[in-house]
Image: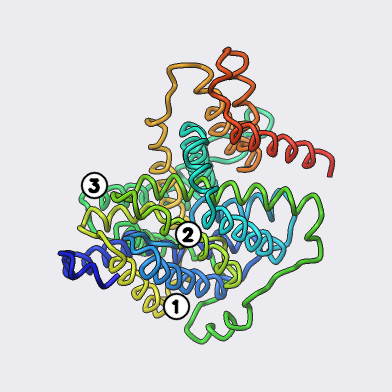
Amino acid sequence: MLQNIKNGISLKKEIIAGITSFFAISYILIVNPMILKDAGMSVEVTFFATAFSSLIGCLIMAFWGDSPITLTPGMGVNAFFTYTLVGSMHLTWQQALTVSLFSGIVYVIVAFTPLSEILSNDIPDNLKRGITVGIGLFLVELGMEKAEIIKSGGDRSLLSFGSIANMTTLVAFLGILICLFLMMKKIPGDFLIGIIITTIIAKLLGVHGSSTSSVSLNDIGKFSQSLFQFDFSSLFSAKFIIAIFSMSMILIFESMGLLQGLLEDSKKFKKAFQASSVTAVLSAGLSTSPTVAAAESASGIQSGGRSGITALVTGILFGVSVVVAPFIAMIPQAAISPVIIITGALMMKDLSSIDMRELDDWIPPFLIITLIPLTGSISTGLQFGFISYPLVKIFAKKREDINPVILTVSTLFLINLVLSAVI
């Protein structure tokens, strides 16, 4: 990594890029614990888990991947962990961590073997982009629910609008406007600043924090006692196998798509992909949902980040960030939801890259994009999207578009779907 300085890389630009990347993604220190709280996990533990997994991930990316990529618990993956594994599949959070561990191991196997190149080349881009868009739409729905912007429609409709008279909803709308203003002005740390300002407004309007306990540096002891909280009791059950397969597919394809989109030097993809996989395994032991490459890394790259020095600076700042721990307990859902909504909207930008000209190209990603939020299950969207791909290609008489890799993965998703229906 340090060899880059001798090769004309500007140390000043790398440091600035690292600081920029940190402020762009620093909201994850607040948002990730709040999402994992819904899985029954301690906010105190998951705050430190988020900080330290990000620190370790960035260091691995710096020294192994030598890329300006931030690794941190991923938005979308944390939603799958909480609302699919724990919420829909009724796993405990300890079992969900075990699923994360083995999914990470599968990810490592793919990353360190020729499988990474095979999947990268042979899985259609429409499907990979559909996953990102579908998870993005799911986050939008999730954020709006937390903000009470939408609610159950009862007998009349699936969903309905909340009420602008609701202080939580009003604060959330103000938070969205504040974050968008900061983003449009390209102010570093836009999301973090937006959360702080929205929290102040919420306090003035009587909307209280979402955590019932305060987080302090003293809680680092709780974190140290909560490492490696795995539950292997149901490891070989069909439910576990389905969960591991689904999360593995999300980690592999989402990370692959993000890294290919972020890295200007394609030669760095392999090692960056490997660094991401190793960190995903470690994050499970640290008691948080898996880490992935953060899309916000683009802000650092745009600021001149070209090497692992950028990731090193970002990692160091994550380590220092534990001093903001007491701030966590003050944050209301109304201040968190705007970030979740806007993050989802940014992920949905990939929709413009999906080829919709032919029905057989559009239907599989369409199923992924619509079924993920409508069913509240990322794995369900993946199953129907991948299973439909070879079928619509056969219907369209385009058998040449079906390669052995996509056929194998689609078959595995079909088996996954059948097993999930009978357990």
Asked if residue 171 can be seen in this view, the reply is no
Closer to the chain start, of discs 2 and 1, is: 2
Asked if residue 201 can be seen in this view, the reply is yes
Q: Is residue 337 above or below residue 361?
A: below
Q: Position of residue 21 (x, y in %)?
A: 31, 61
Nearer to us of marks 1 and 3 is 3
**Hey, which quadrant is residue 380 in on the image?**
top right
> Which part of the image, by quadrant, shows the C terminus?
top right
* Crowding near the residue tagged with mark 2, few <14, some 14–19, many ≥20 C-alpha atoms within 10 Å: many
* Crowding near the residue tagged with mark 3, few <14, some 14–19, many ≥20 C-alpha atoms within 10 Å: few
* Crowding near the residue tagged with mark 1, few <14, some 14–19, many ≥20 C-alpha atoms within 10 Å: some
Instruction: Residue type at mark 3: give it.
Output: Met
Spatial separation of the CA atoms under disc 1 and disc 3: 29 Å
Find numbered disc 3 in the image and state the secondary structure of the residue it sits on.
helix
Q: Which residue, given by chain and number where applicable, does mark 3 sit on?
A: 184
Spatial separation of the CA atoms under disc 3 and disc 2: 34 Å
Find numbered disc 2 in the image and state the secondary structure of the residue it sits on.
helix
Closer to the chain start, of discs 1 and 3, is: 3
Q: Position of residue 166 (x, y in %)?
A: 49, 48
Instruction: Residue type at mark 1: give it.
Output: Pro
Q: Which residue, given by chain and number where applicable, does mark 1 sit on?
A: 326
Identify the residue shown where x is 80% and y is 57%: 236
Farthest front residue? 114
Q: Is residue 352 above or below residue 248?
A: above
Q: How many marks?
A: 3
Instruction: Residue type at mark 2: give it.
Output: Gln
Q: Which residue, given by chain and number where applicable, does mark 2 sit on?
A: 274
Find numbered disc 1 in the image and state the secondary structure of the residue it sits on.
helix
> Which part of the image, by quadrant, shows the N terminus?
bottom left
